[in-house]
Amino acid sequence: MMSVSTPLELALGMPKAELHVHIEGTLEPELAFALARRNGVTLPYPDEASLQAAYDFDNLQRFLDLYYACADVLRTRADFRDLMTAYLARAAADGVIHAEIFFDPQTHTARGIPLATLLGGLEDGLVEGQLRWGISGRLILCFLRHLSEDECLACLDEAEPLLGRIHGFGLDSSERGHPPSKFARLFARCRALGKPLVAHAGEEGPPEYITEALDVLGVHRIDHGVRAVDDPEVLARLAREGVPLTVCPLSNTRLCVFREMAEHSLPRLIAAGVKVTINSDDPAYFGGYLNDNIRAVQAAFGFDAATWYRLARNSFEASFATDAEKAGWIARLDGFFRQRGALPA
Ligand code: HPA
Ligand code: ZN
């Protein structure tokens, strides 16, 4: 007898892309303490359990303070490789076949770690991920918006000789009080380089930050963007223009952007016709990887198979890969659903 897959089984098993994950946010307590020992660094917590107990955030800044403190254990090329490999192993187990991964060079170069060291280590991990699990990975350099535009311009100067190894540029860190328009000159330079661009906007910040990211920075995707529902015009524009949102459900509930999953704007975004994708953001800090996000969303909203198919398809369509790569991945997705008699009409 043919077994019929439930929508959750389909969503967990389906091939998918992850487009919003910060590599520093994949640092699990166990690896943090192993690297601290390896490098003779002292973490501000005595053991893994007390570090984990500190993962009780009531806003973005509380999380960022701990996230930057833990990043101090990352020192050598091997550390960055191990971090990347650990993430890719978990992503592969969740059916991720393509990942576009953020890294924050300023967090490390400010501590005296050369950009070439961290980039080399992250790439070593990507090579291993491709060989061991067949995952395709790209790196997106994120600027820290709590710093000045001049500091970010200096970071771009440093990155210019390594541009062939950087797929795109993004903007992250503390959103409130740091609007996209603060980085108009920086993104004008990034645009001139012809790379894909993204920015965190509308996570804690207002819908106007989404509009600024599109109109002033010229980004191709919005990271989070979940507060678009607060402004019907912004919401309609995202749908009309097909602007993808990289939504991170567990992150949003952990950082109290929404009190609980049932209040998340995800179903409203989908209903409005926005090209939504589901992602893990900082999985070591927010309670899980991509499939943990899918389980939490499904428990709250009970989406049907067609909605999960659409979300996976969006993840490929919204990626910064070639048309040929996207077509190949979508064919794999179709094959997965067809084999289970679940390919939507
Ligand atoms: N928002 C802003 N900056 C970040 C995040 C986030 O969720 N994670 C890592 N840096
Ligand atoms: Zn993020």
Image: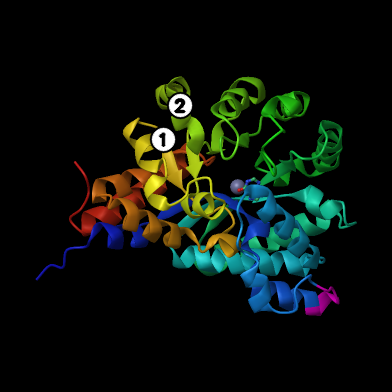
For the point 44% across and 26% down, the residue is: 235
- In the image, 293 versus 257, the foreground residue is 257
Q: For the residue labelled by badge 2, is the local secondary structure a helix, a strand or a loop?
A: helix
Q: Where, quadrant-wise, is the C terminus in this rendering?
A: top left
Q: How is the image coloured?
A: rainbow
Location of residue 314 in the rendering, given as x and y in whole percent from the top left corner: 40, 41
Amino acid under disc 2: Leu
x 66%, y 21%: residue:
216
Q: CA distance from mark 2 to mark 1?
A: 8 Å
Whether the residues at callouts 2 and 1 have beta carbons within 8 Å, the answer is: yes
Give the tally of numbered discs. 2
Query: Which residue matches tag 1?
Result: 275
Outermost residue on the right side: it is 112
Q: Which residues are magenta?
A: 37-42
Asked if residue 171 is among those painted magenta in the image, a careful observer would answer no
Q: Is residue 82 visible?
A: yes
Pick the front one: 308 or 247: 247
The quarter in which the N terminus is drawn is bottom left
Which residue is the site of mark 2? 238
Could you tell me residue 15's position as x and y percent? 39, 56
In the image, 134: left or right of 23?
left
Q: Position of residue 215 (x, y in %)?
A: 61, 20
Quick check: 69 above or below 41? above
Q: Secondary structure at mark 1?
A: loop
Percent position (x, y) of residue 278? 45, 48
Which residue shows up at 61% across the image and 57% down it?
A: 57
Q: Please say whether residue 41 is one of the residues in the magenta stretch.
A: yes
Q: Nearer the viewer, residue 283 or 192?
A: 283
Q: Among all residues in the image, which is located at the extreme left?
A: 1
Q: Earlier in the sequence, mark 2 or mark 1?
A: 2
Residue 7, disc:
none
